[in-house]
Amino acid sequence: MRLAMIALLGLFGVSTAALAQAPAPQATRLAPAETRVNPNVVVDQQAVTQGQITQLRAQVKGLQSQVKTLQSQVTDLGAKTVTYQCTGLATGQNSKGVTFDCSPYVCDRAFAQCKTVCVTRADCESGYYCDQPNRLCIAER
């Protein structure tokens, strides 16, 4: 049942990380379609089926409630996420408007963060060279 719920939530774009925080649904055992109380009395099959339908509807309602809760949690997480972008060779800004300076390294546009070591001169801001053995950007003289 948990796997079915994961698949269902995947359709709604809910991550398994958010699902891990949700309480596990309680399993409900349904009565067989035909239950004999004694050899001479047979339980009304329609009544049993109706009871099963009622139980299933309650389970669906509970799962729908869990989906709404998880969707709300995912939305809240998305609102708290801060994104970053490079705005210059050695500068950047996050989605909250806070700027950052990478000097003497460049801002790595692929990852929207400052490089912290250099491999080539291109990893250093203008006016710096790469000390390759130490992987440091050093000011030119």
Image (spheres, rainbow, N blue to C red):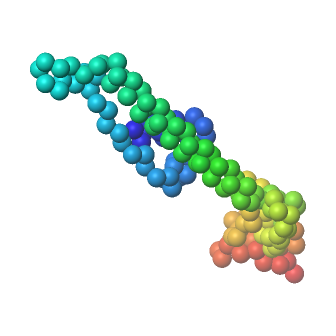
Query: What residue is at 71 percent from the left and 75 percent from the top?
Result: 136
* Any part of residue 138 in sight: yes
| 126 versus 29 height, above or below | below
In the rendered image, which quarter contains the N terminus?
top left
Query: What residue is at 65 percent from the left and 74 percent from the top?
Result: 133
| Nearer the observer, 88 or 136 | 88
| Horizontal relation, residue 8 to residue 79: left or right | left
| Nearer the observer, 96 or 68 | 68
| Horizontal relation, residue 107 to residue 35: left or right | right
Query: What residue is at 85 percent from the left and 68 percent from the top?
Result: 99
The percent position of residue 20, horizontal first and vertical second, equals 48, 53
| 84 versus 117 height, above or below | above
* Residue that sits furthest to the bottom in the current view: 141
Write down the quadrant of residue 141 in the picture. bottom right
The percent position of residue 63, horizontal first and vertical second, equals 50, 40
* Residue that sits furthest to the front in the current view: 40
Write down the quadrant of residue 39 in the picture. top left
| Horizontal relation, residue 12 to residue 23: left or right | right
| 89 versus 127 height, above or below | above
Query: What residue is at 31 percent from the left and 37 percent from the top?
Result: 29
| Nearer the observer, 42 or 11 | 42
The percent position of residue 43, horizontal first and vertical second, equals 25, 22
* Any part of residue 125 in sight: no
The percent position of residue 97, horizontal first and vertical second, equals 86, 64
